[in-house]
Amino acid sequence: MRITAPGSGLLVCLALVVGACVQEAPPPQQPQPAWQPAPPPAAARCADGPPMCSQDRRLIIQCQRGAWITVRTCLGPQGCGMSQGALMCDTSVANPGDPCGPDGSSGCTPDGRASTVCRGGRAAIASTCRGSKGCSVTSGVACDHSVAAPGDPCDEQNGIACSTDRKTMLRCAGPVFVVAEACRNACLSAGGRVLCQ
């Protein structure tokens, strides 16, 4: 006669049931980004042609070899337009590095704190205009450089200015302002005159 321990059958059954129910957990899924950026569109091709104004009238542009290039910036108040059948561009305002022409033409920076000159087809700073009147364009370019800092670019040889701390007088020597004289009391600038006292 075989004696079965009480509950042993139940343990075997439970083991079989548990073994049948246990399953391997699936590998965690990688989170998918909610949005995938679209690839940038290809640059618009164009047919080579003559220069023209940009839509915002701030540039002269031209299609060359199938691509648009900036020929000149026209940041002055008159912008870009046509006059008597000719393309006109107001270059009285320019940023350093902007394409420009002809060489020697001048203007002011957009903030009115410096004058520019066209050199080699690019606008460059001709002089800082730290004085109260800044840089302005009427019949020509007027730059108030009665106040400057040592090392500031300048275009008026031997022109004088007060330093920004009003302690020294500066002189334009070559392309930049240099210290010319220490003022005992102060350097004064008014009405285009500079006095070292």
Image: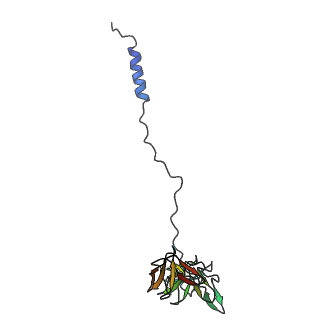
Q: Residue furthest bottom?
A: 84
Q: Extreme top residue here?
A: 1
Where residue 77 sits in the image (x, y, percent)?
64, 81
Instruction: Tell which residue pokes out farthest to the left in this image.
Output: 1
Q: Position of residue 196 (x, y in %)?
A: 51, 81
Residue, far right: 84
Q: Quadrant of residue 176?
A: bottom left
The residue that appears at 44% across and 42% down in the rendered structure is 28
Residue in view at x 53 percent, y 69 percent? 41
Vertical placement of residue 86 versus 70, above or below: below
Q: Give coordinates of residue 19: x percent, y percent.
A: 40, 27
User: Residue 151 location in percent, x, y?
Assistant: 45, 78
Coloring scheme of the render?
rainbow
In the picture, the quarter occupied by the N terminus is top left
Above or below, comparing residue 137 to residue 20 in the picture: below
| Left or right of 139 in this view: 66 | left
Look at the image and tell me whether residue 91 can be seen: no
**Frontmost residue, 155 versus 158:** 158
Q: How many marks?
A: 0
Residue 31 visible at all: yes
**Viewer-proximal residue among 52 and 151:** 151
Which is nearer the eye, 17 or 29? 29
